[in-house]
Amino acid sequence: RLWQLERQRRFASGRLSEIFGEKVIPIDKFARIIGFERIAIETFKNMDKQDQEILESYCNGVNDFVSNINIVKESASAKLLPLEFYAVGLNEFEPWTPKDSLSILKVLNFHLTWNWG
């Protein structure tokens, strides 16, 4: 599931080409033109404090899980990142932020509104 989060985050922020190359630049351009990440930042600013705290708690949970990925520690939550990370040349997971969660929600909302006519 961590790989799914990373893929979705990169799609929503227009950063897929960083790992998949220039073939997906049109997808990145589309995501940046629509502005999923920009809209997510504005949405977070306009959320009430309690909702912001809930979202930050979720992010803290994701980041805590990832920070406990360690090959050496016996009490690690996982021994390695998912293999997909290594297959595309990633060896770390950027900290998860409320912007990431909201960007993905914006993409999902966008997919639900295909009847623009």
Image: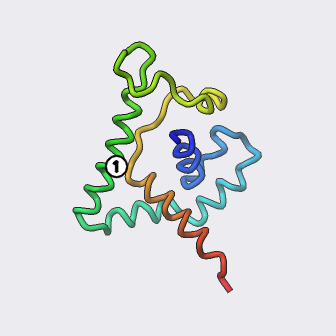
On the question of residue 35 being in view, the answer is: no
From the viewer's perspective, tell me whether residue 22 is left or right of residue 63.
Answer: right
**As drawn, 54 above or below 77:** below
Tell how many labels. 1
**As drawn, 73 above or below 40:** above
Q: Residue at x 55, y 62 (%)?
A: 107
Q: In which quarter of the image is residue 86?
A: top right
Please identify the quadrant where the C terminus is shown: bottom right
What residue did someone put label 1 on?
Answer: 58
The colour scheme of the drawn protein is rainbow
- Asked whether 64 or 17 is in front, the reply is 64
On the question of residue 82 being in view, the answer is: yes
Q: Which residue lies furthest to the top in this view?
A: 72
Q: Is mark 1 on a helix, strand or loop?
A: helix
Q: Which residue lies furthest to the left in this view?
A: 49
Q: Residue at x 45, y 16 (%)?
A: 71
Q: Residue at x 28, y 56 (%)?
A: 54
Residue 89 in percent (x, y) is at 62, 28
Q: Which residue is drawn at 53% across and 49% down?
A: 9
From the viewer's perspective, tell me whether residue 17 is left or right of residue 34.
Answer: right
Look at label 1 and name its amino acid.
Answer: Tyr
**As drawn, 116 above or below 66:** below
Q: Quadrant of residue 51?
A: bottom left
From the viewer's perspective, tell me whether residue 57 is left or right of residue 91.
Answer: left
Residue 33 in percent (x, y) is at 61, 64
Q: Which residue lies furthest to the right in this view?
A: 23
Residue 109 in percent (x, y) is at 53, 69
- Asked whether 95 or 115 is in front, the reply is 115
Residue 21 in percent (x, y) is at 71, 40
